[in-house]
Amino acid sequence: MSDPAKSIRIGTMIKGTRARADETIAAIADLGFESFQPFFWQTTEGQDLAELGKRCREAIGDRDITIPTIGMFGNPLEERPLDRETLEGWKQCIDNAHHFGATCVAGFTGRVRNMPIEDSLPRYRQVWSELARHAADKGVKIAFENCAMDGNWQTGDWNIAHNPDAWELIFNETPDDHLGLEWEPCHQMVYLIDPLPQIRKWASRIFHIHGKDATIRWDVIREHGIFGKHPFVFMRTPGFGDSNWTDIISELRLAGWSGSIDIEGWHDPVYRDELEMTGQVRALEYLKRCRGGDFVAAG
């Protein structure tokens, strides 16, 4: 009998560059993760993605683990050598997603550097209209990560899809149904935006979710504000931050959402380095409890 709880799977991200993703999967596949998201930073490093996808699926074997989404993170809107590699990486990921078993490719929109968001829209429309057509031909969805990468409305280096007002703009430029969001509460919380109402409004556009949270130090904000020398927010692994993931997953279920929540590690100031996987497995167990725990069939 299938497990209805797994209509929302809990997994983790796997680095696809500077590491063998298949070996990482093989090393942690028995820890209880239900999905993986291999991802690339700016470049695929010339890898044969068809072969990599095959190796990743072989590492999973007959376990009930999926790879629904792969990631390509960089700035595909500009013309530096690595930017051009990122754009080419997007095309490669779209072409080879099926070798991983994936139906979605996620990453940053890119940005015209150091300019307001509106100034990126013509270049955004040019690049993503073409990529959207290519993805549609391949049966692949595109999901835009909602991370500002320290940018804001007026300036930045990487991404314009970090604010709900910007989502309205970009989806007006590219209204294709197979373009959506790779969402997480953390990236809204670091700008003091309440993430929960976004689920109710944007659930149909959320194609993939990153399991990452934040801790907001309101005492620092009250004393020093958000532009002082003292950090007022920290990115956290789920279970250690401020979000109630039971509420998040409940809102997702109420919206009829299904998909994968893949933990994005390497950001927690406490559970990092030798404690990295300790924190990730704790987050895995926590998110499964927030999902409702083990499935129990109705009588």
Image (cartoon, rainbow, N blue to C red):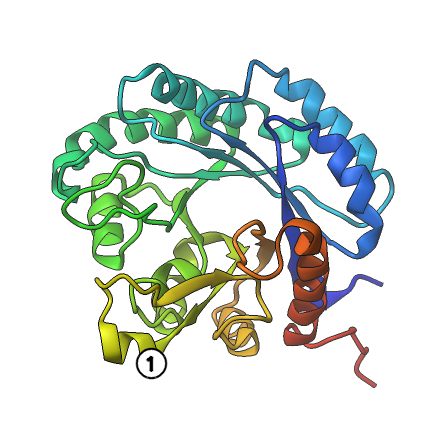
Which residue sits at x=57%, y=77%?
A: 246
In the picture shown, does residue 252 fall above or below 148?
below
- One can see residue 296 in this view: yes
- Left or right: 49 in relation to 223: right
Which residue is at 51% across, 27% downward?
94
Q: Looking at the image, which residue is at 57% across and 38% down?
A: 103
Q: How many marks?
A: 1
Q: Position of residue 144 (x, y in %)?
A: 39, 44
- Expressed as whole percent of the image width and height from the top left, the position of residue 173 reads 21, 40
The image quadrant of residue 124 is top left
Q: Nearer the viewer, residue 272 or 37?
A: 272
Residue 185 in sight from this viewpoint: no
- Say which quarter of the image contains residue 128: top left
Q: Residues within 10 Å of mark 1 (few under 14, many from 20)?
A: few
Residue at figure coordinates x 38%, y 74% from the top left: 217
- Secondary-structure class at tag 1: helix
- Image position, residue 38 (x, y; %): 62, 37
Give left or right: position of 84 versus 224: right
Which residue bears the numbered disc 1?
219
Q: Residue furthest bottom?
A: 299
Near-viewer residue (198 or 272)? 272
Residue 231 image position (x, y, % from top left): 35, 63
Q: Residue furthest front?
A: 229
The quarter of the image holding the C terminus is: bottom right
Quarter that holds the N terminus: bottom right
Which amino acid type corresponds to the residue marked 1 in the rendered image? Asp
Whether residue 170 sits left or right of residue 44 in the image: it is: left
